């Protein structure tokens, strides 16, 4: 029996749509694997009822099949499905790392990321390694077709999860197909600022770099209360706010750890004022 903890992740970080991702201190999925003649999956924990246990429909099951590594896989979900925190990616990442070890397959980190992304693709329809990469590698990751760059990072954040359902399919459906030159220039500037901020663990720069003129404004329409929550988080001291992954989670970067409580309570309060229940994690990248 082998046990792996696979952290929740926040993809995009505003200006890095389908490119940036960051591992969060918590929550996390815990994946346990044991050799078996055929793969079975059991799921407990947050939103377990929404996670398929048929191995061909579960990201971890697909990873086991692709790796030819049949196993009893037990997933304890800490990462709620459809939260914007890379829930299916965490299970795929945990399974890839655990089964690689259990069967001594010797895959490199980058191969594990590609394998886990395939698992996610079969279930979600499209492969985006911006969640599986940080779940496997930790820290802040930059994923492109040419490779994966990783950086250590240490930033206090709050992620607020509203009780709203936004499917990744819908969230991708509202993304504009083209961008203007002004938007491109602004996005490149913000993404560059964010990377510099990550390198320096500077919450002011990272907060500034979270701003995105294209994808986030379109997706904000799907998250009731997004503008009010953003404003409340900023008033409580957050340096920047954006949608986590495809949403509906909302991520706020804080100046220091002690500020997270006030930011979390401001965000939950703002959602409540809009009639939306929510829950906030005080965590770190
Ligand atoms: N980059 C992806 C998106 C993450 O925002 O749609 C979710 O798969």
Image: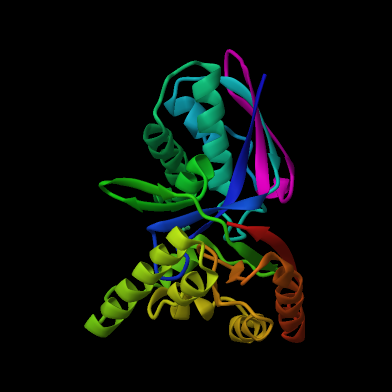
Image coordinates for residue 117, horizontal then vertical, percent? 43, 42
Spot the residue most to the left. 181
Regarding ligand 1, which quadrant of the image does it lie in? bottom left
Viewer-proximal residue among 193 and 268: 193
Asked which quadrant contains residue 77, the reply is: top right
Q: Is residue 55 magenta?
A: no
Viewer-proximal residue among 199 and 39: 199
Spot the residue most to the top. 37
Of the 4 image quadrants, the one containing the C terminus is: bottom right
Looking at the picture, the colour scheme in use is rainbow
> Left or right of 135: which side holds 232?
right
Identify the residue at horizontal 39%, vertical 65% (top origin).
Answer: 196
Viewer-proximal residue among 91 and 48: 91
Say if 97 sits above or below 34 in the image: below
Image coordinates for residue 233, horizontal then vertical, percent? 65, 80
Identify the residue at horizontal 55%, vertical 32% (top origin).
Answer: 95
Q: Which residues are magenta?
A: 27-50
Image coordinates for residue 32, horizontal then vertical, percent? 66, 28
Say if 82 sits above or below 262 in the image: above
Using the rendered image of the protein, determine whether residue 101 is visible from the camera's viewpoint: yes
Using the rendered image of the protein, determine whether residue 179 is visible from the camera's viewpoint: no
Q: Is residue 46 magenta?
A: yes
Identify the residue at horizontal 64%, vertical 51% (top origin).
Answer: 25
Say if 53 sits above or below 169 in the image: above
The kind of secondary structure the magenta stretch mainly shows is: strand
């Amino acid at each position: 029996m082998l046990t792996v903890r696979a952290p929740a992740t926040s993809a995009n970080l505003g200006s890095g749509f389908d490119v940036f991702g960051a591992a969060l201190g918590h929550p996390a999925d815990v994946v346990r694997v044991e050799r078996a003649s055929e793969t079975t999956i059991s799921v407990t924990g947050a939103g377990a009822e929404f996670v398929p246990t048929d191995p061909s429909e579960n990201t971890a099951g697909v990873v086991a099949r692709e790796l030819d590594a049949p196993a009893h896989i037990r997933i304890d979900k800490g990462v709620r499905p459809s939260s914007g925190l890379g829930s299916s990616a965490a299970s795929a990442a945990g399974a890839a790392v655990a089964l690689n070890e259990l069967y001594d397959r010797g895959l490199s980190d980058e191969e594990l990321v590609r394998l886990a992304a395939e698992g996610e693709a079969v279930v979600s329809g499209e492969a985006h390694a911006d969640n599986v990469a940080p779940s496997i590698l930790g820290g802040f990751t930059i994923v492109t077709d040419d490779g994966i760059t990783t950086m250590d990072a240490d930033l206090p954040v709050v992620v607020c999860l509203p009780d709203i359902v936004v499917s990744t399919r819908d969230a991708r459906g509202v993304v504009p197909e083209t961008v203007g030159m002004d938007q491109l220039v602004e996005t490149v500037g913000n993404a560059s600022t964010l990377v510099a901020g990550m390198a320096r663990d500077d919450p002011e720069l990272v907060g500034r770099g979270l701003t995105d003129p294209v994808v986030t404004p379109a997706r904000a329409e799907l998250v009731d209360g997004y503008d009010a929550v953003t404003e409340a988080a900023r008033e409580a001291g957050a340096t920047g706010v954006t949608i986590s992954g495809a949403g509906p989670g909302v991520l706020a970067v804080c100046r220091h750890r002690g500020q997270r409580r006030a930011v979390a309570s401001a965000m939950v309060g703002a959602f409540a004022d809009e009639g939306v229940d929510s829950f906030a994690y005080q965590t770190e990248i």
